[in-house]
Image (cartoon, rainbow, N blue to C red):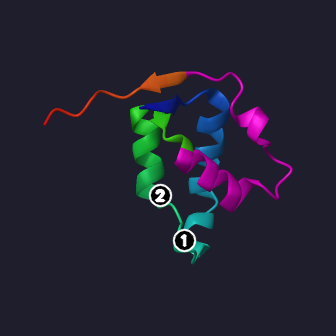
Amino acid sequence: MFEIRLNDNIKTALNKLCQEEKLSNNEDKDRITEEEISMYIGEGSIPMESLVSLYNLYWKDSSEASLKELMTPLDFKFKDKRKP
């Protein structure tokens, strides 16, 4: 499997999201916590599913960032295989 490597646009958007406290105001069951975002920033990558969820929850209706802008430049990070 793979994840999206964080570029400057995604890092900036994630950091801004944490600072705006939108995360704690969202009662949605699919919400993503500040701890998860911090983990993604620390790891330098984010699962595509999580990025799409964040986009749909927080950025879709905003003129701040389009999905295309967030993902440019696009780079993938391949995850290590789990060892049984």
Count the numbered circles shown.
Answer: 2
Q: Considering only vertical position in the picture, is 68 above or below 33?
A: above
Nearer-the-camera pick, 74 or 84: 84
- 84 sits left or right of 49 in the view: left
Q: Give x and y (percent) for residue 48.
A: 55, 41
Q: Which residues are magenta?
A: 49-75
User: Which amino acid does the dot numbered 1 rest on?
Assistant: Ser
Nearer-the-camera pick, 19 or 4: 4
Task: Give residue 34's mark.
Answer: 2
Nearer-the-camera pick, 83 or 41: 83
Q: What's the distance in space between the residues labelled 2 and 1, CA to CA?
A: 8 Å
According to the picture, the residue beneath numbered tag 1 turns out to be 24
Q: Looking at the image, is mark 2 or mark 1 earlier in the sequence?
A: 1
The image quarter in which residue 65 lies:
top right
Q: Give x and y (percent) for residue 82.
A: 23, 34
Viewport quadrant of the N terminus: top left
Q: Give x and y (percent) for residue 71.
A: 68, 31
Q: Residues within 10 Å of mark 2 (few under 14, many from 20)?
A: some
User: Which amino acid does the dot numbered 2 rest on?
Assistant: Glu
Q: Considering only vertical position in the picture, is 64 above or below 79?
A: below
- 42 sits left or right of 29 in the view: left
Q: Residues within 10 Å of mark 1 (few under 14, many from 20)?
A: few
Circles 2, 1 touching at the beta carbon (< 8 Å) = yes
Residue 71 is a magenta residue: yes
Judging from the image, what secondary structure is the residue with disc 2 in?
Answer: helix
Residue at left 57%, top 74%?
A: 28
Residue 53 is a magenta residue: yes
The image quarter in which residue 66 lies:
top right
